[in-house]
Structure formats: structure tokens, C-alpha cells
Amino acid sequence: MTELSKTGAAVGEPAAARRSEAFLEVRDLKVHFPTDDGLVKSVDGVSFSLEKGKTLAIVGESGSGKSVTSLAIMGLHRLGARGKNVRMSGEIWLDGKELVSASPDEVRKLRGREMAMIFQDPLSAMHPYYKVGDQIVEAYRVHHDVSKKVARARAIEMLDRVGIPEPAKRVDGYPHEFSGGMRQRAMIAMALVNNPELLIADEPTTALDVTVQAQILDLIRDLQKEFGSAVIMITHDLGVVAEIADEVLVMYGGRCVERGPAGEVFEQPQHPYTWGLLGSMPRIDRETSERLIPVKGQPPSLINVPSGCAFHPRCPYADIPKGNVTRTVRPELEQVSTGHWSACHLPTEDRQRIWTEEIAPKL
Amino acid sequence: MSETKKTDEAAIPQQTPASEGSADREVLLRVEGLTKHFPIKKGILQRQVGAVKAVDGIDFEVRKGETLGVVGESGCGKSTMGRVITRLQDPTGGKITFEGQDITRLSTGQMRPLRRDIQMIFQDPYGSLNPRHTIGSIVSAPFRLQGVEPEGGVKKEVQRLLSLVGLSPEHYNRYPHEFSGGQRQRIGIARALALKPKLVVADEPVSALDVSIQAQVVNLMDDLQQELGLTYVIIAHDLSVVRHVSDRIAVMYLGKIVELADRTSLYEAPMHPYTKALMSAVPVPDPKRRGQKNERILLRGDVPSPIAPPSGCRFHTRCWKATEICRTTEPQLVELRPGQRVACHHPENFADQAPQDTVLLSAAKKASELVPDAALSDGPAEKEPVAEKAPAAEKKPVAEKEPVAGKAPATEDTASEEAPEAAGSEASTSEAAGSEDAPEATASEPAEAAATAEAVSEAADTAPAPEAAEAAAAAEPAEEKTGPGAKSTPKATGKTTGKPAAGSGAEESSDE
Ligand SMILES: Nc1ncnc2c1ncn2[C@@H]1O[C@H](COP(=O)(O)OP(=O)(O)OP(=O)(O)O)[C@@H](O)[C@H]1O
Ligand SMILES: Nc1ncnc2c1ncn2[C@@H]1O[C@H](COP(=O)(O)OP(=O)(O)O)[C@@H](O)[C@H]1O
Ligand code: SF4
Ligand code: SF4
Ligand SMILES: [Mg+2]
Ligand SMILES: [Mg+2]
């Protein structure tokens, strides 16, 4: 990695752009897909930053743009046939390098080495015809000039590290011979074999049982501690967020509606959509005969994103801000306290009142 | 979810074995010793070489007006149990009694009148609705199949049902693809309710939905229960959802019920170690509790294969309290506290049932490394000072016993893990809803399955396409280890033995 940053310092750095101090900084990222039905604005102006050793959770309903955001960072939208059909803008700074303007080749060199990703479905990352160990060996040798033997030892070490029993034997197994939880671990082993400094996990536990989920979350946490990586955890489970995140970014309709330290987002959430997520969720830690408070209506279309605040058709408070502003003006993120941002037209007093009087007591 | 929730469960007369008639009246559905084994066949002669013991001897009852939740890890037999109690599949053994009538062996024809009373809602809001039928025709199918003419006509009744589930009556002529997941699930619910069923078995009714939409559907089911006096069996793997909706909860592990209790007892003082581990694994949406990892019980490894489940207590290969008796003797499901039935020799939060047996199995000692002290000591049920057993880990291991019929290879486990995927792809390629009708239908034959689906077009509305694919896909790796390509070239081994897994009447549709 060090040698890469030496050579890579100049990678695609736009002349005018302000370099980023943060380890990862995403600025006004837009990812649009032209389709027959119209332009899909999957990600429409998302910004955040992340330091090493920290975990950012991205939450939101399905289709809100979480995966597209992470694939953009990994440079995966620009590959193959897909690449022709995407419009990307904004900046992604990783360790001093700008990735949106970098060539696909330059990004490829970083992928797997400086940044790695684990997916919801391990089979999309692992090839069914090749032995698990060989795939890890391959991932290692792409970035390390070592013998097969050395790489194999490394693969076994990684399998052991992620808690696969009898790693020396399992290294020669095929993905389908592993259970779902083990496959997930094997994929994590593969993602981590090069000690990436940024790990993106896209719903890594959504398909798993809670018992296995607990094992995997533990594993990610331990490995992060050990290697000091930055982690982006994409999930729709607020329980997982509370468990693992330092920072939370709530996405709605391709935009960030709230962002802040995890403790604050749970204890002082500022956006009506975040309230909706919290109210919809049944909780295992409480005996409540109260009804859930669902968010009414449906998630927005990303082709015809509602005008003004994209959440306004579902927002119970859309009429409070004066002058129909929620339907005409897109709210920008505003800082409500240090590092805590929210994009909502509600006046602060109203927001505080609604939260403390109407929402919090019911959660 | 129902009124009973507000009353103290313990106050409800505990029903005791069949003799007590009065308690019996409360019971809508009774299940005794129920088993469902799927034979594994091999070779050209299709000789049976074993069986997937999906459901392996379970007893429970469902009382009128209540919601019974069923939880457990993937592959433990929840869906199979649901399909068998609704008689969409034939049980291998045991007895099912509905309103006092033994329905275990009723033929398709004999079951037909009962189809009105027992309905099922399926997990996949995409696969379970025939894309070529209008919403009106889907929701009115049960009337046609049962030959029922509702008062005021079918169309009017369907429109009433649509508004009942929060859809607009104008949706009558629209097609499923025009609806979102949550709306489709409402359509499935409207169809299930068309004939005013007494019992609704819902298999993961909200797991495919986003949390905000999930809440809409949970509330809807709650309202309908209040309004129509429905009885629910809700199968789900999400323990938070189950806690929210259920009056009583059955916890399954490898084809068995290991604990059956009212909601409060189960969540506040679980007695089965597996229940405790399962609940401790659920992440709590409260960052303040973060780092209190010390409450979390991690289980080692995976669920063993249901083809060769461990001897004695099936949980003994992963349990931190397992002793010799756990390996040799299967614990029976007994009522240790009023309203709380547990199958364990060394229950949590209760007196040890086999105190003489103190030597931990070596697997248990390993497992106990993953059990934090906090989890061992703090039984929330301390309020009831029942001779609380000393934490297992403290026991002095005297003569160490050697491990135990080793863990079954994890290979089989992939079966259930892969299922959803296979199901997904199947559902999209082939509206294979009727595929279970075809005796040999498997995941590898989408075309054929689709053809079958054509033939029984109506069935497509009611049959659970993904379930069919799931079953087929699931049975596949069970046969033997196949090459690396096994997944992409599924072999036709998942021969379904059960009868057509159609909803409110696939069989009827064929003779339409
Ligand atoms: N038709 C079938 N043929 C062979 N095996 C089957 C069949 N249907 C289910 N099984 C097996 O029976 C076991 C129980 O399956 P079931 O679908 O009931 O699990 P479940 O508890 O519903 O799991 P999930 O949470 O994943 O839905 C699994 O091992 C499964 O592979
Ligand atoms: N290649 C693509 N072409 C067109 N639309 C896409 C493409 N990839 C994703 N989208 C759309 O972008 C939106 C956001 O997708 P995604 O980021 O995957 O959501 P999620 O938040 O569930 O991860 C969805 O509406 C999806 O259909
Ligand atoms: S801007 Fe208006 S519509 Fe949007 S979340 Fe705030 S109050 Fe609701
Ligand atoms: S203590 Fe014994 S009987 Fe109880 S769950 Fe553990 S292994 Fe089973
Ligand atoms: Mg996604
Ligand atoms: Mg199931």
C-alpha cells in the first residue's frame, strides 16, 4: 500500500480540486443511470468523510442508493458494459487520491488492496468453480509478488483468523461446500487478505441468521481493531447500526437526509424520516403493546423524485414549515450540532418539540 | 396482537392432556407428535438412503384468537411445519386436530371445505402472485375455487377486501407488477381473508419488506385480528417482530420445539439455552448498550444437518451446558412453569432437571468460552428464586468425556442457505407456482415447471412458487457432495413427496 500511495499520489488529481485531509472523503457524489424509463438518480449529491479505525453506517430503505454509493467508491460502476451507462460526478478522496477522475486502471490497483468490499451474497464475490483457498491466494497474489506456497499459507492464516474450523483442510473446499455463514467468513477472509485500509460491507449479514450475524459482526469489529481499517457498513437494520457504527448516514431517495455521531442520531434524531425508521421498528429489548408507527406510503421513485423535500409525500410534518417550502425547495444539510447534520425545513423549535413530545415517548 | 396479549397469559387456564374438555374448547388447532421427513433417494433405482427430518416430532396447540409465533434459525423446519399444519403437505406422522376434527389424513376432497377455514400467507410478495392475473381475479380466486357467491357479488366483496387491507378498490383491474412489495403482501392478505378463515398461517409475512412498510403490514394484521377475531400462526426469523406480534412463542431447533412459552416469560426468562443464545444475538438498537458484548452468547459453528441430527438433545453439540445425559437422552418438552414448556436437562432460570449429571462434555467446555460471565449469572428471572443452578462453566470437570458424535458436515447446511437464492431466480424465470404439482419438478427445470404452472393457471395465484423451488433446491446438496458446479447445475434430486403445495386450492383449479 505504501508503495502505491507513493506512485499513486498524483492519481487523477483534478487540478482545481481541494485535496482532502480525511482518510476517505466523498464530496457531492452523484451517480445517475440513463434508462429507457428516464434518468435514475440513484445517488444525488452525497457527502461524507471517514477516518481510519472508524465505522460509518449507511442506512435507508431498499433503493435509497446505499449500494450504488459503495460501488461508486469501489469504482465498480465503470466496469464493463455497465460503465457506458453511468454518469458520475463529484469527488471521492481516498488517502489523498481522487477516484472519480482516476482511470479505471488506477482504481483497479487500489481495489482489493487499499479498499475491499464484502457483499450480501458471498457467491457474487466468489466463483463457484474455484476452491475457496485458490480464490484467496489469487486475491493476495494480485497485489503481492509471492510464491503460491507463501500465498497459500496466508490464505490458511486468514481462514483461521475469520474462524473457519480446520482451515488447512477447508482451504481446498468449494464455496458450495460451505454454509452461508462460513461462506460469508471466507469472503471476509478474501476481502481482508491484503489488509485493506477501507472495508465496505454491503448488508453483510442480511441473509444470515442472528446467531451467525452476531459472529460476523464480532469478527468485523475485531479485525477492524486489529488492522485499524475504516469500515463502511451498509445495512437497513438499526440494531446492527447501534452495534457497530461510530457515525450514521441516513439515505432517502438517493440523498443524505441526516448524518451524525451514532449516539446522537439515536438519541436526538433530527429528521422526520429517521423518526419514521425508529418508530417502524419493533424492538426486542422492550415489552411494548404499543402499535408500531409506520411511515405511510411508498418509497419514492428515483426517476421522478418528489419536488422539494423528497420525503414530503410521506412526511406527517410537511405542512409545518411555512409557504409550501417543503414541496418546492430542496432542503440542504444543515449542522444542528457538532458533526450532526440534517436536511429538513422544520424550524428548530418545532423539531425539538415534535421529537421530545410526540416521537421519543412512543419509542 | 390479540386481546389475550393484555391479559396475563398465566391466568389463562393451562390446557392439560386431552381429558379436560373445557380447556379443549379454547384450542383451535392441536398438533401431536407431528413429523415430516423428506426422503433422500439415490441411484437409478431411486432407493431411499435417508431422510431430511425437517419436522421431527412436535407438539403444540393454537388457541382461538391468539397469535402463536414460531422462531428458529434457517432450515429448522418452520416453513415445513406451516405447510404441514395447513395440509399443503402431508405429514409423515403425528396427528393434527382442527376444531376437534382429526384432519391428519383427510384427502384433498375432504380437505376442501376446510380450506375456507385455514389459510396461508407466504413470504415472497413477488413470487406468490400470478403476474398475468389482475388483482381482482387473484383476490376472487378463493370464491371461484370454493364455488362461493358472496353477498352482493364477487366484485363488490373483492373491493371491500381491498379496502380492508388498505388498497384502493380501483386497483381491481391492475396487475401485480404495478404494486410495491408491501402492497403485494396486502393483496396476499386480502386473498387469504376472502373466505373468512378461522386460522391464518403466515410464513415470514414481513421479512421481504422494508422496515417502514413492514410496520404497515404488522399493524394491518393486528387490526384485522381485532376486527375479525382471527387466529394467527406467524412464522418469522426476526425475534423483534415475533416479540411484537405474538402472545405465545415456539422456538424451534432442528425440527423440534425446544421451548414454548408466553411472550413475557420467553423474552424475560428464557429457560432453554438455545432460546437464550438466540435472543442474546439480536442486535439492540441502542448504542448505549454497545460494548456490552458481555451479554452476548456466541454459538460455535453452524446448525447440524437435519439428515443426521445429533443424538439426545440436538443442541448438545453447541450448548455450553451439555453433559453426558444431553448426549444420550433426549429431553422431553415439559411444562416447568405454568405456561412455559421446555425441553432441556439443565434449563436456565430454573432448577436443574438432571443435577446428578455434572460433567461437561468437552464440546460444552469449548462453547462456554463464548459465553460471557454476565450472560451466565444474570438471569432476569432472578425475581423468582427457583433454585438457580450454578453456571455450567463453574462445574469441575472431573473425568473428561470425549466428544460426541461430531458435528455433521456443514455441507448440508448450504441447502437452506442457498434456498432463497434459488427461489428468487426461479420465481422470476418461471412463475413456477404450480411446480410442486409436477412430481419431478425441480429447480433445474424451470421451463417444465412453468409449463405446469400454465396448466394449473389458477393455482399459480395461490401456490407458493418460491417454496417449490426452495424445496427442490434444498434437497439437492443433501444427496451427495457434487462437484463445484453443483450450484449452477442443480441436479434433479429434490423430488417432492408431498402433495401440491398450493394455497387455497391448487387441486380444485385443475378440475376447473
Ligand atoms: N421438499 C423438500 N424436500 C427435501 N427437503 C426439504 C423439503 N422442504 C424442506 N426441506 C428441508 O427441511 C428442512 C426444513 O426446511 P424449512 O423450509 O421448513 O426451514 P425453515 O425453518 O422454514 O427455514 P427458513 O428460515 O430458511 O425459511 C431444511 O433442511 C430443508 O432443506
Ligand atoms: N445499473 C443501474 N441502472 C439503472 N438503475 C440502477 C442501476 N443500479 C442501481 N440502480 C437503481 O438505483 C437505485 C438505488 O439502488 P441501490 O443503491 O442498489 O439501493 P440500496 O439502497 O437498496 O442499496 C435503485 O432504484 C436501483 O434500481
Ligand atoms: S423538509 Fe418538510 S417534508 Fe421534508 S422531512 Fe422536513 S418537514 Fe418533512
Ligand atoms: S443443557 Fe443439555 S439438554 Fe439442555 S439444551 Fe444444553 S445440551 Fe440440550
Ligand atoms: Mg443494496
Ligand atoms: Mg422458511
Image (cartoon, coloured by chain):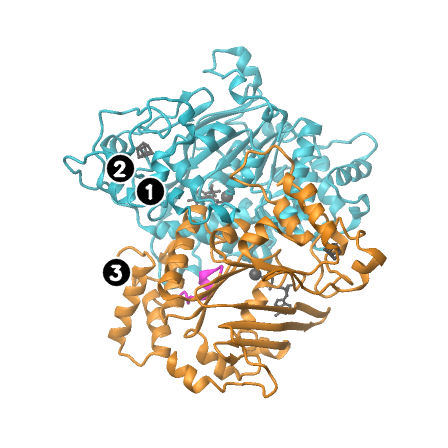
Chain colours: A orange, B cyan
Three-letter residue code for mark 1: Val
Q: Nearer the viewer, mark 3 or mark 2?
A: 2
Out of A345 and B47, give the one closest to the viewer.
A345
Residue B63 visible in the snapshot? yes
Image quarter where the N terminus of chain B lies is top right
Q: Are marks 3 and 2 on the same chain?
A: no
Disc 2 and disc 1 in contact, CB within 8 angstroms: yes
Q: Secondary structure at mark 3?
A: helix
Q: Is residue A3 left or right of residue A251?
A: left
Residue reaching furthest left?
A: B399
Indicate which quadrant contains ligand 2: bottom right
Of label 2 and label 1, which has the lower sequence position?
1
Segment tinted magenta in the rendering? A120-128
Q: Is residue B30 depicted above or below A218 in this figure?
A: above
Residue in the picture at 59% in, 88% down: A15
Three-letter residue code for mark 3: Lys
Residue in the picture at 49% in, 83% down: A105
Q: Residue B329 location in percent, x, y? A: 27, 29
Three-letter residue code for mark 2: Ala
Out of B484 and B287, give the one closest to the viewer.
B287
Task: Tell me the distance, in whole angstroms, between the alpha carbons under discs 3 and 2.
Answer: 31 Å
Q: Residue B450 location in percent, x, y? A: 59, 54
